Image: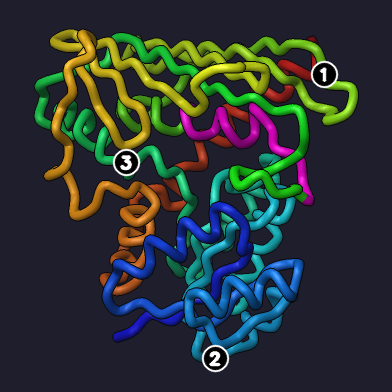
């Protein structure tokens, strides 16, 4: 069985998925959707994709398409995920699942009704560094007491990771905080019972807060401190410090270190060191095996309930 895929969004993240899929047997991207037809054709030619369009509906109408990966602007995520499920297609939507709780609720409800695989791209669940820590937790060898997380970028213009202009505005809470909120609850294996947030001034041009601080507490007593900034002129990305009862781990994307900066070999944790590829492998395996995937829309839904509560809190401040 070859799973035939349509991919929407030929920007920086869409290309990461295309690169990952190249390494996965039994999967073929047959349709590419993006807003600029000429640029989309360029990407399609590079990856040998035959069908190109600017309208997702064109791809959903293709009988041979089994599944869709959505790497589109945040504001489109819920609506497009619903469209895929209504068309009978399995779907993986990049983070965040939705930009509001109502959208997330609608997606979870329709997935349950259709029984199709619907998964959200919470990549941190799949990075080998975080998988290593998760295996220690599952084996009962490590328990989180505190997570200290820094998500830092330097942003003055509305551009993506490739320096290209975005058609939408990135957001610290709905996008970047979602990674950590979900990962924290997943690694603790305990629901979040307390959440607080404060934010800095709103940028006059981008219209978003450029700095934010979030505190979380899980039902098992573990705490999390998350600092986010678009003002950081230094190393960029997200850095995780796991402080536990038996060890301290520092995770930087796919790399893992002890609290004393001794590197840990995580090359044998999974079949790849690429978190996006591992995420896609889980999506396609769940389709073939007819099971719920890790980071299914149902499993990550609590994250969006927490983000909704934090948004309400910030709006009232």
Q: At 61% from the left edge and 67% from the top edge, which residue is drawn?
A: 8
Q: CA distance from mark 1 to mark 3?
A: 32 Å
For residue 267, which quarter of the picture?
top left
Q: In this image, 6 relative to 308: left or right?
A: left
Which mark, residue 202? Answer: 1
Residue 102's spot in the image, x, y percent?
70, 45
User: Looking at the image, which residue sits at the far right?
Assistant: 204
Is disc 2 placed on a helix, strand or loop? loop
Magenta residues (range):
167-181
Tag 2: Cα neighbours inside 10 Å, few (<14), some, or many (≥20)? few
Q: CA distance from mark 2 to mark 1?
A: 46 Å
Q: Which residue is mark 2?
A: 63
For residue 6, which quarter of the picture?
bottom right
> Disc 2 vs disc 3: Cβ atoms closer than 8 Å?
no
The one nearer the camera, 300 or 1, is: 1
Query: In this rendering, which labeled residue sits more in front, label 2 or label 3?
Result: 3
Is disc 1 placed on a helix, strand or loop? loop
Residue 180 in the magenta stretch? The answer is: yes
Q: Is residue 178 above or below residue 224?
A: below
**Main SS, magenta residues:** helix
């Amino acid at each position: 069985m070859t799973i035939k895929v349509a991919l929407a969004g030929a920007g920086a993240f869409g290309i990461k998925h295309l690169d990952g899929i190249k390494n996965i047997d039994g999967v073929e991207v047959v349709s590419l959707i993006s807003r600029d037809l000429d640029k989309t054709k360029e990407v399609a030619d590079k990856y040998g994709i035959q069908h190109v369009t600017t309208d997702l509906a064109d791809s959903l109408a293709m009988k041979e398409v089994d599944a869709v990966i959505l790497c589109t602007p945040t504001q489109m995520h819920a609506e497009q995920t619903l469209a895929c499920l209504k068309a009978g297609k399995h779907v993986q939507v990049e983070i965040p699942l939705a930009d509001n709780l109502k959208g997330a609720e609608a997606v979870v409800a329709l997935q349950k009704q259709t029984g199709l695989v619907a998964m959200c791209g919470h990549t941190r669940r799949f990075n080998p560094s975080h998988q290593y820590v998760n295996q220690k937790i599952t084996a009962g060898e490590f328990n989180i007491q505190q997570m200290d997380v820094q998500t830092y970028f330097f942003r003055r213009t509305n551009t993506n990771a490739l320096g290209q202009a975005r058609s939408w505005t990135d957001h610290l809470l709905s996008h970047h905080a979602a990674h950590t909120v979900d990962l924290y609850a997943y690694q603790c294996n305990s629901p979040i019972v307390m959440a607080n947030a404060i934010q800095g001034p709103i940028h006059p041009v981008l219209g978003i807060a450029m700095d934010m601080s979030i505190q979380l507490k899980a039902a098992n007593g573990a705490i999390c401190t998350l600092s986010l900034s678009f003002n950081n002129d230094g190393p960029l990305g997200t850095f995780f410090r796991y402080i536990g009862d038996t060890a301290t781990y520092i995770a930087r994307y796919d790399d893992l270190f002890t609290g004393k900066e001794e590197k840990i070999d995580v090359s044998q944790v999974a079949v790849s060191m690429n978190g996006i590829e591992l995420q896609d492998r889980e999506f396609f395996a769940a389709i073939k095996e007819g099971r719920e995937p890790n980071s299914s829309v149902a499993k990550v839904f609590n994250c969006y309930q927490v983000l909704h509560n934090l948004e309400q809190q910030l709006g009232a401040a």
